[in-house]
């Protein structure tokens, strides 16, 4: 499967994603610099974590005006697979490809730690390798990760199965104490209504090898690869 | 006019003697810009004038050393075409004045030192020392420094994986922020801060120059008066986003073979980088200061030369490479400007708006900079320091134990490490606080990895500087051994008081001697570091506090063990001597409020044997956990093994060997000791291996249960230990 990883100035998980997709999973990976006008032929676009444009103004707010973004939007609207991780999720929100917005963490601080995620919808291109209700152990690392959306949008998203992951405790229960940033309804990841564009705050690329303590993140990348084979 | 220039020189910290030397050498008055250059290059922070003669004692060579001191960072060979590049630096004065930006720009500076060598930074450590937790300014400093490090390091995408967090009243008015960065570089593609080829082009790279940080280096070379906050404008403001772009642009230019030499602009900015690059290359330079990109109007040549604006580099490229260099910089939206050329004159010639403002022999400012043989004297109170205070009234062991657990050093630093991205770059195998050292895997050379640790002990070093310094190297090497790593090399930050005081100079001499002896004994060549003098406020010197950062090689990161008990049913074994002393111990400090006694010096043969036993036992998969005994002694270390165990495993132990002198044997401190756990079936193998190496071996009991039972002295529920471990730290 062909993956295009977008490199913004300030991206810092681009190489991590390339390592997992390329070295660990043996896929075809290309970096695409943000100043490129068009995407190369690809099956999935990954917007990696980091501090695009230093996160000045607001996380993801400037990256959304990068030249490549227009083509990413076109690719997504044509049904192409797009995954935004952490800062990439913030960019997708700013670009209007995903519903909702991101606020600074409730603590006011950057938080880096392992969290537990419950898979809320296992019938998507990103999660079909998981079981519904399965608990994944994947780390977060962000200062602006408090997902927010107005109540009516949330209702719609819940009905349409657009909530992909919630922060839970080790036993799978959604609890304030298990929510690292104060996200509304403990939401850690969402998708668009069409089911081809995904955003998540946790970093699956940091949990894809046994030596790093968890392989749960790999299930998500493998789901994408399986989806592409079926297509 | 002459009087004015001289006054200017004295005001900028040059001495009468130095002024005389300048005028004698030049046979004329220096210009205003030249005065600035002399003041910057001859100050303590840049010239090491008080320390240079002593630093020559440090062993800097070894079979693996590719680059030793004198460059931007040291490099050691890892085999297989890879090398590790690392350095530690202090940012004490700026952090004391303005903790957030002070610490942030400290990270920015040390990262530049690493990537100028051609290495991609893969990990940071921060050794932080603050005043008493109850001192009014401590929470402000802790919170500012930690968030400054997080701000810069996180944005750069370099994981902060460990360090130290120490509280002691000696740092009440002068915190220590020592930052360490490790990078990985191809051994055949190391870059140097040298301008070697006459005719090549000098290019200014990075952010534009402003008035920030002028006289920063001289601020770090003087003691603070009461109103240090007035110096706040000399602290620079960091822009980690600019530096992240600079990092990627530099590595790209290096990949494309565009760079002949490169140096970051740190202390004393453009002055230091031009002079040092020319000095190392044995060349000269002609520079047009009017071409330097500026962000403030009306800057004088002296201001341009002294600015410490962050995120700037000086590089040398061939005349044919200039266009390509500017192209890469433009792609990353960075400034780039050819400002001069390398000459063969040995002189630094600088013009500003067509007028010559600097024309100096390079060597006079660098290799021939003044060296001070500062007077030293044994401190008058040394005997007193070595005398133990009157024994405190008897107290039950359990009472003392619980009191010790109230010390901030027992508390979890998780509230600090969670603010740092410690996992970016997918290399962090051992997370902060889990083990005696952090472990990063080498993505290009699996299953190998690097272990890194930093250690210092101000109180012990104050009691006996040579022994204290010797022991911190020993401890760092033991920390590495506890994760299964063998040492490769060492970098240091030597944090001391005012070198104009003979007793401080004696402490420095002694500490460097101890450091040199330890580095020779434990095979850790010194590849670089820095000296920070004048750490005092209102006349009080800090404890002499050398801090070392040591890098070790792990053959298989899959075999690394952590500090906490790992499995119920394992046997707990004490490796190393059971003997220990209360001298300088945490116990004695808490009990009496006094730092007194004479610390034991590590026996090199025994210490090496213990480390070797640990590494080979970990490599063969024998051990399930390992933790060194350091501050706090045996019981303290056992309590740490409990709170660091997954799920809170207690233990049932028999410590009756300590009945003779419980305080000394349970709370005393001594080098060369570790607590390990392993399966009972493997006990005979470990015993045989210990005997073979002459390492004392004492099984203490078994892991498991809801209590830490140390018969016949204490029995404490695991929850009590966990609660103390989780108690909040000031400012967090």
Image (cartoon, coloured by chain):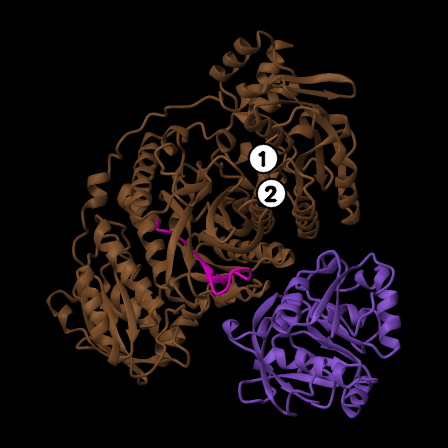
In this view, the residue in front, B391 or B219, is: B219
Q: Are marks 2 and 1 in contact (CB under 8 Å)?
A: yes
Task: Tell me the residue that label 2 is attached to.
Answer: B116
Query: Would residue B453 be counted in the magenta stretch?
Result: yes
The residue tagged with tag 2: helix, strand or loop?
Answer: loop
Up/down of B412 relative to B268, above or below: below
Tell me which chain the residue with mark 1 is part of.
B
User: Hue of chain B?
Assistant: brown
Say which residue label 1 marks: B193
Q: Badge 2 local density, few (<14 within 10 Å), some, or many (20+)?
A: many
Write the start and end of the magenta stretch as one range. B439-457
- Residue B471 horizontal/vertical position (percent): 29, 50
**Residue B422's x, y, as percent?**
55, 64
* Residue situated furthest front in the rendering: B80
Q: Chain ID for label 2?
A: B
Q: Provide residue B679's location: percent of width, then percent of height.
A: 28, 79
Circle 1 sits in a helix, a strand or a loop, which is it? loop
Which of the chains is purple? A
Placement of B671 over or under B503, stated as above or below: below
Residue B230: mark in rendering: none
Name which residue lies at 23% across and 44% down: B385
Image vertical order of residue B129 relative to residue A64, above or below:
above
């Amino acid at each position: 499967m062909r993956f295009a990883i977008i490199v913004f100035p300030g991206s810092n998980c681009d190489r991590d994603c390339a390592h997992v997709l390329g070295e660990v999973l043996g896929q075809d990976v290309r970096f695409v610099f943000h100043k490129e006008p068009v995407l190369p032929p690809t099956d999935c676009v990954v917007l990696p974590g980091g501090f695009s444009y230093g996160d000045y103004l607001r996380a993801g707010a400037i990256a959304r005006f990068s030249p490549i973004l227009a083509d990413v939007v076109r690719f997504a609207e044509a049904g192409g697979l797009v995954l935004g991780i952490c800062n990439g999720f913030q960019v997708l929100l700013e670009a209007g490809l995903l519903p909702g917005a991101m606020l600074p963490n409730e603590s006011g601080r950057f938080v880096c730690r392992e969290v537990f995620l419950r898979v809320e919808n296992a019938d998507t291109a990103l999660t079909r390798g998981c079981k519904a209700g399965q608990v994944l152990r994947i780390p977060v690392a962000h200062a602006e990760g408090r997902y927010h959306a107005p109540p009516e949008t949330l209702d719609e998203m819940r009905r349409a199965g657009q909530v992909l992951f919630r922060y839970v405790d080790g036993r799978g229960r959604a609890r304030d104490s298990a929510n690292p940033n104060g996200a509304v309804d403990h939401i850690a990841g969402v998708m668009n209504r069409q089911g081809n564009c995904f955003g998540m705050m946790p970093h699956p690329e940091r949990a894809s090898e046994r030596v790093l303590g968890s392989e749960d993140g790999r299930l998500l990348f493998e789901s994408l690869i399986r989806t592409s084979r079926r297509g | 006019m002459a009087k004015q220039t001289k006054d200017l020189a004295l005001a900028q910290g040059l001495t009468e003697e130095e002024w005389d030397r300048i005028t004698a050498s030049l046979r004329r008055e220096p210009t205003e810009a030249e005065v600035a250059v002399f003041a910057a290059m001859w100050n303590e922070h840049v010239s090491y004038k008080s320390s240079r003669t002593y630093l020559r004692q440090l062993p800097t060579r070894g079979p693996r050393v590719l680059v030793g001191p004198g460059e931007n960072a040291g490099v050691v060979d890892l085999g297989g075409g890879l090398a590790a590049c690392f350095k530690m630096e202090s940012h004490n004065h700026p952090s004391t004045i303005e903790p957030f930006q002070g610490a942030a720009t400290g990270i920015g500076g040390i990262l530049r030192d690493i990537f100028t060598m051609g290495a991609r930074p893969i990990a940071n450590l921060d050794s932080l020392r603050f005043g008493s937790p109850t001192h009014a300014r401590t929470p402000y400093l802790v919170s500012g420094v930690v968030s400054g490090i997080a701000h810069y390091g996180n944005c750069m995408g370099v994981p902060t994986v460990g360090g130290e967090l120490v509280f002691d009243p000696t740092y009440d008015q002068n915190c220590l922020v020592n930052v360490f960065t490790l990078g990985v570089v191809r051994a055949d593609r190391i870059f140097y801060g040298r301008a070697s080829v006459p005719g090549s082009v000098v290019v200014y790279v990075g952010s534009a120059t402003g008035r920030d940080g002028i006289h920063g280096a001289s601020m770090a070379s003087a003691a603070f008066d009461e109103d240090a906050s007035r110096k706040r404008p000399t602290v620079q403001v960091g822009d980690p986003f600019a530096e992240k772009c600079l990092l990627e642009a530099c590595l790209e230019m290096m990949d494309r073979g565009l760079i002949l030499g490169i140096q970051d602009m740190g202390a004393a900015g453009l002055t230091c980088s031009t002079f040092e690059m020319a000095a190392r290359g044995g060349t000269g330079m002609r520079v047009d200061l009017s071409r330097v990109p500026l962000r403030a109007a009306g800057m004088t040549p002296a201001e341009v030369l002294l600015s410490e604006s962050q995120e700037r580099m000086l590089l040398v490229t061939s005349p044919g490479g200039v266009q390509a260099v500017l192209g890469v910089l433009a792609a990353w939206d960075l400034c780039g400007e050819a400002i001069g050329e390398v000459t063969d004159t040995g002189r630094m010639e600088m013009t500003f708006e067509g007028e010559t403002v600097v024309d100096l022999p390079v060597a006079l400012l660098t290799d021939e900079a003044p060296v001070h043989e500062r007077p030293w004297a044994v401190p008058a109170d040394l005997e007193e320091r070595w005398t133990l205070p009157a024994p405190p009234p008897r107290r039950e062991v359990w009472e003392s134990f619980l009191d010790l657990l109230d010390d901030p050093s027992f508390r979890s630093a998780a509230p600090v490490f969670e603010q740092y991205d410690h996992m970016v770059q997918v290399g962090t195998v051992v997370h902060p606080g889990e083990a005696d050292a952090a472990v990063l895997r080498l993505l290009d050379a699996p299953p190998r990895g690097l272990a890194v640790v930093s250690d210092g002990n101000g109180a012990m070093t104050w009691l006996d500087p040579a022994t204290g310094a010797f022991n911190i190297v020993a401890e760092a090497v033991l920390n590495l051994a506890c994760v299964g790593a063998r040492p490769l090399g060492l970098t240091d930050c030597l944090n001391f008081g005012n070198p104009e005081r003979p007793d401080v100079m004696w402490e420095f001499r002694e500490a460097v001697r101890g450091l040199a002896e330890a580095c020779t004994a434990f095979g850790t060549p010194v590849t670089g570091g820095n000296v920070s003098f004048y750490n005092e406020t209102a006349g009080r010197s800090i404890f002499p506090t050398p801090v070392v950062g040591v890098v070790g090689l792990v053959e298989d990161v899959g075999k690394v063990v952590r500090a906490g008990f790992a499995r119920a049913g394992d046997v707990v074994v004490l490796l190393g001597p059971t003997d220990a002393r209360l001298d300088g111990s945490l116990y004695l400090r808490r009990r009496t409020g006094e730092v007194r006694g004479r610390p034991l010096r590590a026996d090199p043969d025994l210490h090496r044997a213990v480390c070797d036993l640990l590494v080979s036992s970990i490599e063969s998969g024998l051990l399930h956990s390992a933790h060194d005994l350091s501050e706090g002694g045996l019981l303290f270390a056992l309590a740490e093994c409990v709170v660091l165990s997954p799920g809170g495993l207690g233990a049932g132990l028999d410590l009756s060997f300590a009945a003779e002198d419980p305080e000394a044997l349970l709370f005393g401190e001594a080098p060369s000791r570790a607590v390990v756990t392993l399966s009972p079936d493997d006990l005979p193998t470990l015993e045989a291996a210990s005997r073979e190496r002459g390492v004392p071996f004492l099984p203490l009991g078994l892991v498991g249960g809801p209590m830490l039972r140390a018969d016949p002295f204490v029995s404490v529920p695991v929850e009590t230990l966990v609660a103390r471990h989780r108690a909040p730290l000031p400012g967090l």
